[in-house]
Image (tube, rainbow, N blue to C red):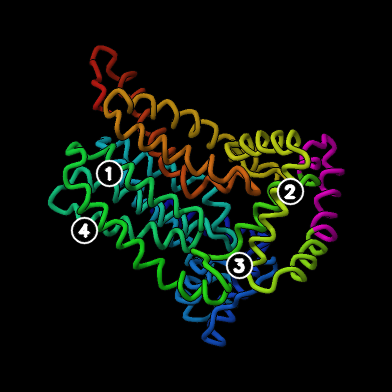
Amino acid sequence: MLIAVVVRLAAIALYGPSTLRFGDAVSYLDTASDLCRTGHYSWQSNLPFFRAPGLPFFIALATGCGPDRVPAVKVALVALDAATVAVAYALARGLSFGTPAALAGAALVAIHPFFVQSSADVTTEPLATLLVAIWLAAVVWAARDGSRRLVLWSAAGAAAGFAALTRPAAILCVPLGIAGRLLLDRRGPRGLAADAACFAAAAAIVVAPWSIVASRAAGGFVLVNDAGGYALWRGMHPMLARATEERDPARFLAESDRFEREVSPHAAADVDRRASTPRARSDEWTRLAIEDAKAEPWLAARYLVRKARVYWRPWVDRSISPGWLVAASAAVLVPVLLGGLLGLARLARADRGAAVFLALVLMVPWIAQLPYQVMSRFRVPFSEVPLCVLAAAYGWSLWERARSPARRTGPGRM
């Protein structure tokens, strides 16, 4: 945890304590500022939807309603990442990995380039990753600790709810949590109703009050916010699909810039004329996205394939990161990705249910998010902590084998 704090504070110093380069950072800070100044949530942002409330509320609470103090916001996000290191250790122990492997997994989380980069700016990743990691560790431990099973399932449900309020895609943690109960708990269906009830009730208690308020403001039901329609339209737009096929980086940037300056604002104005509420606007964006996909299905299909590759790209985005950071991230992320997959395969020999559950955690968010505007940071909350833990366990098993070639290492000793 101390290593995580030192590395992130150094990154903030290099990046600039008050520097904001992430496109949505100012919007999150403005939303938190409006909340503190007026006592009401802002149903508008710099894009044609309102923001999920998790990060703005966290910023307001963590800074004592001083969101204009950007360095304080970044330090608060660093604290979240430090806590994620501890949760990664707990997850590894819940998977029956030994102490050295669990410490190695926590160390990988401490130096993970995606985490370091996100805490140097103002992004949702530190908060969303911590909450999803808590959910995952609680689900794993609930199957191991019968005496605290209901408490752990309640904690898992609450973490899933707060994660969804931060990154709406985390609502997938609810069905994945039920799948985890069936795959991890050796009791099978026995006791499932009580466990699932605690889990679902805790998630509903967290999400439902916000959903009721947001739905009233949106003029129709929304679970968290109304961003889904716009994100789908943007993620399926033919102009962006063609831009990603450009081999010339200058032309790609020019087309992307033209989309931001001309196409998106013009489409937003048209949607506003046809729809008067956030819910109606989201539905209109969805309709436009479907029309675009139907008009050019092969282009849409090629775009989905490219986004599937980008999601798992094992380095930070070269268009927004310096070359040294791209190289450093690849040096860490490539081994983590490969080691994590090998660790998952090794875990399958010791505990097939746990391996299948973790495979679902890696795969389901990937597939569910492909129609939207996908980038590699979309996978961070769902995959990076379990991949680090699995990679460390696999690496430690190789180290043990190299030290003691004559000693047989059973499948349960990772």
Q: CA distance from mark 2 to mark 4?
A: 47 Å
Residues rendered magenta in the picture: 241-263
Identify the residue position indicated by label 1 in the image: 181
Q: Earlier in the sequence, mark 3 or mark 4?
A: 4
Relative image position of residue 365 (x, y in whole percent) = 50, 44
Identify the residue position indicated by label 4 in the image: 151
Residue 197 can be seen, yes or no: yes
Give the amino acid type for the residue marked by disc 4 in the picture.
Val
Q: Earlier in the sequence, mark 4 or mark 1?
A: 4
At numbered mark 3, what does the secondary structure look like: helix, strand or loop? Answer: helix
Label 3 Cα neighbours within 10 Å, binned few <14 / some 14-19 / many ≥20: many
Identify the residue position indicated by label 2 in the image: 291
Q: Earlier in the sequence, mark 3 or mark 2?
A: 3
Q: Earlier in the sequence, mark 3 or mark 1?
A: 1
Q: Earlier in the sequence, mark 2 or mark 1?
A: 1
Relative image position of residue 64 (x, y in whole percent) = 47, 80
Label 2 Cα neighbours within 10 Å, binned few <14 / some 14-19 / many ≥20: some
Q: Residue at x 27, y 29 (%)?
A: 351
Q: CA distance from mark 4 to mark 1?
A: 14 Å
At numbered mark 2, what does the secondary structure look like: helix, strand or loop? Answer: helix
Please tell me the numbered disc located at residue 279.
3
Left of 98 or right of it: where is 387? right
Q: CA distance from mark 3 to mark 2?
A: 19 Å
Indicate whether 314 appears above or below 51. Answer: above
Please tell me the numbered disc located at residue 94.
none
From the image, give the main secondary structure of the stretch colored magenta.
helix
Q: Are marks 2 and 1 in contact (CB under 8 Å)?
A: no
Magenta stretch holds residue 360: no
Q: Quadrant of residue 19?
A: bottom right
Label 4 Cα neighbours within 10 Å, binned few <14 / some 14-19 / many ≥20: some
